Amino acid sequence: MSTAAELDAADPLASYRDRFVGAASDLVYFDGNSLGRPLVSTAGRLGEFVREDWGGRLIRGWDERWMDAPTRLGDELARTVLGAATGQTVVADATTVWLYKLMRAAVDAMGRRDSSRTEIVLDTDNFPTDRYVAEGIARERGLQLRWIEVDSRAGVTPDQLGEAVSERTALVVLSHVAYRSAWLADAAGLTRIAHDAGALVLWDLCHSAGSVPVELDAWDVDLAVGCTYKYLNGGPGSPAFGYVSARLQDELTQPIQGWMGHAEPFAMGPGYRPASGIRRFLSGTPPILGMLPMKDMLGLVEAAGIDAIRAKSVALTSYAVELTDRLLPEVAVISPRDPALRGGHVTFHHERMREVTARLWQRDVIPDYRDPGGLRIGLSPLSTSFAEVEAGLAAVAEELRR
């Protein structure tokens, strides 16, 4: 087994670490899959915006560049990390709002196509927001939820989805990377199964965008949603994104009709007329400030290359598993051991992990905790070193044995 120093010396992406605030400190950050570190350049970009764009241009900024910011940044995001053509992605709102808008639009469109399609298929270990939104929409629209019971150490398999979908399925809602186990779903294969049943599919990309290669167009995905504050380092509460395949945009009616999605937003007319294309899925005023940190991060991702980022991610999580086997034999690894089936984080199980996590935070080692007994470490490839992984897991071993 190579040492952390050897792995860091051989890491082709090691130099990117210096671009993140605090990465050179002794703090061990194991929560990049919940909130990424800020880039050093973000402080300058925000300050320049306040002085020049906001302070200098004031309301003129809307006419000059801000109105198109959601679609312009959406196209950049699509090109850099989503494997999608232009005109299908827009940045706005929060993940929960996007889930509601796109789930609701999808089931309504399917109901118009075929009134017998009354089921939403999703798994019991999907992220809570996804499940909660689906429950609310089912109540609103008189639909049924069909649950796939999954192993919380894994995720939805093709066989499970094949058994769950039917001629009654309107929509399938799945996560590309499971938030608890890091199970990496076969997005292309599962999408084909949903389509073969005549259903639409919505992918949650929150734990994969910026860490795992995504090919939305090649996979023939219908809809996708993701946040930008994890591996895309957009900052706390940064806006989410929504993807709607071009072939569906004219058919879907989004349910939160706001002025920004109107064909003529400044006409202030008496009725709503949706804009053409992806812009119709906007609702309210875009969060311009919240979009700024992503610009530099997308440039960094493009420079490094998503395939190289994925290779570093696999190396980091594999090293974490190897260290855990050696240093923490009493701990169970509940993420897939095969890196081809694992996203960018690893979860370990022990009954005392809640108290261990609290003590680790006191000593500047920052993982997060997930019931039951799960200590989750999210290793953001561009800002995490192998030495950081080694130091953090040594601290876990010390605290577990105190």
Image (spheres, grey):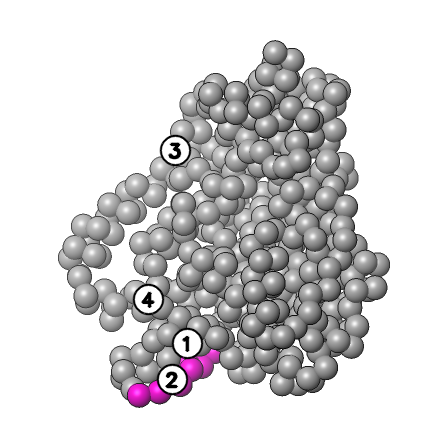
- The local crowd at label 3, few if under 14, some if 14 to 19, many if 20 or more residues have their Cα within 10 Å, is some
Q: Between 189 and 273, which is closer to the camera in this rendering? A: 273
Tell me the number on the disc at residue 21: 3
Q: Main secondary structure of the magenta part?
A: loop
Of pointers 2 and 4, the one earlier in the residue sequence: 2
Question: Distance between the Cα atoms at labels 1 and 2?
Answer: 7 Å
* Magenta region, residue range: 270-277
Residue 340, given in percent of the width and then of the height, sits at 74, 44
Residue 84, given in percent of the width and then of the height, sits at 57, 65
Give the answer, above or below, for where 150 lies relative to 159.
Answer: above
Q: Residue at x 41, y 51 (%)?
A: 238
Q: Amino acid at mark 2?
A: Tyr
Of pointers 3 and 2, the one earlier in the residue sequence: 3
Tell me the number on the disc at residue 272: 2
User: Which quadrant, please, contains the N terminus?
Assistant: top right
Tell me the number on the disc at residue 285: 4
Q: Please, which residue is most extreme toward the top here?
A: 402
